[in-house]
Image: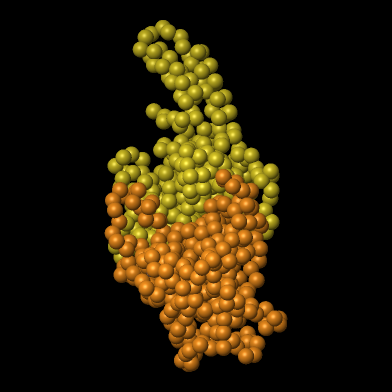
Chain colours: A orange, B yellow
Amino acid sequence: MNWISNYVRPKINSLFSRREMPENLWTKCDECGTMLFHRELRESLNVCTNCGHHMAITPRDRFIALFDGGMFAEVKVPAPVADPLHFRDQKRYPDRMKAAQRSTHEQEAMLVATGEIGRTPIVAAAQNFGFMAGSMGMYVGNAIIAAAETAVKQGRPLVLFSAAGGARMQEGILSLMQMPRSTVAVQMLKEAGLPYIVVLTHPTTGGVTASYAMLGDVQIAEPNALICFAGPRVIEQTIREKLPEGFQRAEYLLEHGMLDRVTPRGEMRTELITITRMLMGLPPAIMGELPAPGTPAEPQAEE
Amino acid sequence: MHSYLDFEKPLAEIEGKAEELRALARGEDGIEVEREAEALDQKARALLASLYKDLSPWRKCQVARHPARPHCKDYISALFTEFTPLAGDRGFSDDAAVMGGLARFNDRPVVVLGHEKGHDTASRLDRNFGMARPEGYRKAVRLMDMADRFGLPVVTLVDTPGAYPGKGAEERGQSEAIARATEKCLSIGVPLVSVVIGEGGSGGAVGIAAGNRVAMLEHSVYSVISPEGCASILWKDAGKMREAAEALRLTAQDLLTLGVVDRVIPEPMGGAQRDPAAAMANVGTAIQAMLDELSGQDRKALVAGRRKKFLEMGRNALPEPSSFIPAHFTQGRDRG
Ligand SMILES: [Zn+2]
């Protein structure tokens, strides 16, 4: 395979999708109301420079910031059967899909890529909350399996950024079956002795949390991310009482022993480099902004 | 006294009339009612058959939740001997919504576990209506581990509206507990057979249902979300649960067609609640058949087979909805 030809050239202007790009150059922080320059936001990876609020970031923008020189090769995900149940609620499922594809310019709710972080070869997968709430259907299941298979084949760790409202209802029971399917993918990594790092981002809920997103060797979350099985509203309806401040947020889960770390987005890359290199038995990385690999990276030699 | 579902109201009238007639005859000598009562019985039987011939998905949900349906505890006492309940997750508490322990199935030692909903107000509260907390899933993991160490097959009985959405359950890691239970199901080196006996409610069901073989009772349901929940999210109207039940394809027959379950176990006419003993016997036959299918497979083959089953799910082309099997279909081999 000619790896270099599969490189995705980083597009600086892709940091904000066209739809979100307003006429002026400001975006208002939905937490503190501060008006933020787009250039400023781009540099801070969509984190408010005033209050530290972590806004959504697309998988593509995340990968551009994550990988050395912003270079990565997309891993092809096998396409599942489209609309297996011929599902129709108020809209047809294929129409919802088309609308999501138009607004995100992405095929589905998960992006998988290979590349290097601090010269450490990894496989990364990132869920796109902007695509039908990042919901887990057969495509997302296939993406996780493809990510795990690639990691095993190339002897790389897998770093997965989760973000989802849960399972994709329009695929019915087949979306629920992605819970065991994705769990099998995680088991492949474990058996191959490869690290599986989960970065939980806002929000990660439902069947996604109750499967691959909670099975990492190391569980890291972005600050204030909502992470839960049942959402706060469902719980309030069930127990008929107000929930405490910060309930089900990253810091709350850390306090309750459900996470290893809560790490701001700006420090995530360095932290992932440090952790993956130690788990892979590699020497400390040379830190800092690294250019893209100069030569096409070869698949890692077998141990 | 039989409790009737909404759609069974006409049946309740006829059966009630027959009952009244017979009561009348018992009170006064010399009144001949048997012929009339017999005619009403016959009418009731015909009505029951026509009602259950083609149950809509929403009606199936109602039957699956019927309070008089046999529950996990009933199956364990009917089909297993020497049942020895084992309790606790060794970390926090025991969760009565998941019951399990050692038992013999047709004399063979096994681990049996399942969701238990309870049968009256007190036991329903005690069992939290079959909605498990993390401790329930952690107990399941512990029991599956034990089965794995001692080479005992695991039988799971699935019947839950879903995992409990509560404050403490979330604080103690409901998601992690379900994820670990699913992972355990997929890694044990002993046969794991699961039967959905009532409601297969989302992740709360999957956690103990990722088996080598999965069967469903004829009128049970298994779904990613309840029809009410789906209706309120996608239709913005919880009253559209009929439409949602239809769209979700959650019946045993649909799941068989989609390749998610391996067999459909027939229920007596009118559902398991009309003749629990017969329904439970059918489940027993199916469990034995599934264990037989897996006999002779070593640890590696059992684990590999289970993983392959789930990896392949939905990977191949699926049949068109027009070829979905009518609701009254059951797999031929299970008919007897
Ligand atoms: Zn702010």
- Asked if A93 appears above or below B189 in the picture, the reply is above
Please tell me which residue is depicted at 43% across the width and 66% down the height of the picture. A28
- The answer to whether residue A197 shows anywhere in this view is no
- The answer to whether residue A80 shows anywhere in this view is yes
Residue nearest the viewer, comparing B107 with A165:
A165
Count of numbered badges drawn on the protein? 0
Is A235 positioned to the left or the right of B44 in the image? Answer: left
Image coordinates of residue B255 in percent, x first then y, are 59, 49
- Asked if A227 appears above or below B116 in the picture, the reply is below
Give the image quarter of residue B166. Answer: bottom left
Image coordinates of residue B42 in percent, x first then y, are 54, 21
Residue nearest the viewer, comparing A148 with A93:
A93
Q: Name the residue furthest top.
A: B30
Image coordinates of residue A262 in percent, x first then y, are 38, 74
Please tell me which residue is depicted at 47% across the width and 38% down the height of the picture. B239
Q: Quadrant of the N terminus of chain B?
A: top left
Residue nearest the viewer, comparing A233 with A36:
A36
Q: Quadrant of the C terminus of chain B?
A: top right
Please tell me which residue is depicted at 40% across the width and 61% down the height of the picture. A228
Is B61 positioned to the left or the right of B122 in the image? Answer: right
